[in-house]
Image (cartoon, rainbow, N blue to C red):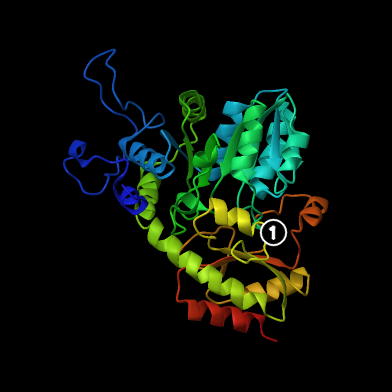
C-alpha cells in the first residue's frame, strides 16, 4: 500500500474489535485472565493496550520498520533509546545543534551517569570519522535540526557508524515519515515527537520510536515497560487520528513554507532565512536527496538582533501564536533563544547561531495569503 493508504489503515484490524471502523479507546488499566498462568496479548496497560498497539503498528508501517513503540512524550522516547543503548563508560556523539531538551537530557542526566557526550558539527560528514572512537556506541542525529534546519547526510553517517560498531538514532520530528525515512537510509532507530506533526493539532503529548532490529526493540521495550513512561489510550487515539491526515497536512505545510521563505528572503527587516528548500541553503542538495519535500519550518534572523525586536514581531503577529511547540495546523512562532533552547548555555547558543533576534516559524495550513499578510504587518514599521 502507498503512504496515504497506510496512514489510514495500517496497524489496525477491525475484525478483532467488533468491526469498529475507528480504533476503540480502551480506557482500562487491566485485562481479565481466564485462569492462573494464562498468556494473553494484554494484561496491564503500562505494558500495552490495543489502542497503543494500533498506533505502534501504524508508525512501524509508515517508517518501513518491523517495530514501533509509543511513549508519554518525545523526551521519554529519547530517554528510553539512550538508556537502552548506553551504559557508563560509553560515548554518544550528538549533532551539535540539536533540540534544547535533548541537549539538557544528554548533559545533565546522561553525562552525570557516566556517559561521555560529545557534540560535533555533523553537517560535515568527515567530522564523524574524526570524532568517533572505540567507546562510541551511539550517534544521535537530527535532520533537519532545531531550530536552524541544518541537514546531515544520514546515509553517509550511518555507514561510518556501522563500520565502527555504533548505532545511529535519528530524531526525524521535523521531517515526519511522510518526507523522510531514516531506516531506509541506514539508521538503526528513528524517533518522533508525535506532539508535533504526527498528532498535528496541538492537543496531544506523545513520542514514538521505530526500529527494525529485534534485539533493539526488545531492549527499548524493556525500558518502556520498566520505567512506565507510556501514553494513555486517549492520546494514542488522538495521534492515530492525526496520522490519518498527515499526508494531506504536510503537503499544505510544505506549500505554505515555500511561499513564506520566498517572501521573507527579500524582506528588508530580515538578515537571513533558514529553509532547506532555498538553493543557497548549505544542506539543500542533501535535503533534495533524502527528503521528499523541504518541510514546514522557516527560521529567520532579524537584522535587529535583539530580544526586544524579536518580541515586538512575535507580539504583533495575529495568526501565529507565540508557543513552545510546532507542527500544528495553526501557525506558531517560537523564540528559540528563550524557549526551545532556553536551558542551553549562552556561549553554546552563540556558537551555534541561536540568536536573540531569531524566530522559528512553524507554518500552518491556513490560507497562504492570510499568513503572508500577517507576517507583513508584524514586520512593518
Q: Residue furthest left?
A: 18
Asked if residue 185 is positioned above or below residue 342 in the image, the reply reads above
The residue nearer to you, when weighing 259 against 195, is 259
Asked if residue 170 is positioned above or below residue 255 in the image, the reply reads above
Q: Picture quarter containing residue 83?
A: top right
Q: Picture quarter containing residue 158?
A: top right
Image coordinates for residue 131, horizontal then vertical, percent: 77, 35
Q: Is residue 104 visible?
A: yes
Image coordinates for residue 290, horizontal then vertical, percent: 55, 50
Image coordinates for residue 300, horizontal then vertical, percent: 68, 68
Q: Is residue 190 left or right of residue 23?
A: right
Q: Residue furthest bottom?
A: 381
Counting the numbered discs, the total is 1
Q: Is residue 129 left or right of residue 317?
A: right
- Is disc 1 surrounded by few (<14), some (14 to 19) or many (20+) residues within 10 Å? some
Q: Quadrant of the C terminus?
A: bottom right
Identified at 34% across, 34% down, the residue is 49
Image coordinates for residue 227, horizontal then vertical, percent: 52, 29
The residue nearer to you, when weighing 127 against 227, is 127
Asked if residue 157 is positioned above or below residue 307 in the image, the reply reads above
The residue tagged 1 is 282
Q: Residue furthest top?
A: 37
Q: Is residue 166 visible?
A: no
Identified at 25% across, 49% down, the residue is 22
Q: Is residue 107 left or right of residue 60?
A: right
The residue nearer to you, when weighing 48 against 90, is 90
Identified at 31% across, 36% down, the residue is 50
Q: Secondary structure at mark 1?
A: loop
Identified at 69% across, 53% down, the residue is 341
Amino acid at each position: 500500500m502507498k503512504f496515504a493508504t497506510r496512514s489510514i489503515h495500517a496497524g489496525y484490524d477491525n475484525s478483532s474489535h467488533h468491526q469498529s471502523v475507528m480504533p476503540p479507546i480502551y480506557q482500562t488499566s487491566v485485562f481479565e485472565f481466564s485462569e492462573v498462568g494464562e498468556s494473553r496479548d494484554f494484561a496491564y496497560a503500562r505494558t500495552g493496550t490495543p489502542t497503543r498497539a494500533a498506533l505502534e503498528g501504524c508508525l512501524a508501517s509508515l517508517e518501513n520498520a518491523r517495530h514501533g513503540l509509543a511513549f508519554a512524550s518525545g523526551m521519554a522516547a529519547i530517554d528510553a533509546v539512550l538508556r537502552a543503548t548506553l551504559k557508563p563508560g560509553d560515548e554518544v556523539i550528538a549533532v551539535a545543534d540539536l533540540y534544547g531538551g535533548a541537549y539538557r537530557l544528554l548533559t545533565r542526566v546522561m553525562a552525570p551517569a557516566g556517559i561521555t557526550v560529545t557534540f560535533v558539527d555533523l553537517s560535515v560528514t568527515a567530522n564523524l570519522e574524526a570524532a568517533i572512537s572505540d567507546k562510541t556506541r551511539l550517534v544521535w542525529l537530527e535532520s533537519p535540526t532545531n531550530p536552524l534546519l541544518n541537514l546531515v547526510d544520514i546515509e553517509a553517517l550511518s555507514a561510518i557508524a556501522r563500520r565502527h560498531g555504533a548505532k545511529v538514532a535519528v530524531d526525524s520530528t521535523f521531517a515526519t515519515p511522510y518526507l523522510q525515512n531514516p531506516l531506509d537510509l541506514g539508521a538503526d532507530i528513528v524517533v518522533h515527537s508525535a506532539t508535533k506533526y504526527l498528532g498535528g493539532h496541538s492537543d496531544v503529548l506523545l513520542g514514538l520510536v521505530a526500529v527494525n532490529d529485534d534485539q533493539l526493540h526488545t531492549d527499548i521495550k524493556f525500558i518502556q515497560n520498566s520505567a512506565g513512561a507510556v501514553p494513555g489510550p486517549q492520546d494514542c487515539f488522538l495521534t492515530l487520528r492525526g496520522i490519518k491526515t498527515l499526508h494531506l497536512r504536510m503537503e499544505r505545510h510544505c506549500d505554505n513554507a515555500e511561499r513564506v521563505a520566498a517572501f521573507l528572503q527579500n524582506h528588508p527587516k530580515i538578515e537571513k532565512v533558514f529553509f532547506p528548500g532555498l538553493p543557497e541553503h548549505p544542506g539543500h542538495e542533501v535535503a533534495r536527496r533524502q527528503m521528499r519535500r523541504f518541510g514546514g519550518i522557516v527560521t529567520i534572523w532579524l537584522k535587529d538582533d535583539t530580544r526586544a525586536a524579536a518580541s515586538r514581531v512575535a507580539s504583533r503577529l495575529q495568526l501565529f501564536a507565540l508557543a513552545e511547540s510546532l507542527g500544528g495546523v495553526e501557525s506558531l512562532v517560537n523564540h528559540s533563544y528563550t524557549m526551545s533552547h532556553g536551558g542551553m548555555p549562552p556561549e553554546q547558543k552563540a556558537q551555534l547561531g541561536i540568536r536573540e533576534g531569531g524566530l522559528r516559524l512553524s507554518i500552518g495550513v491556513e490560507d497562504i495569503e492570510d499568513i503572508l499578510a500577517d507576517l507583513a504587518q508584524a514586520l512593518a514599521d
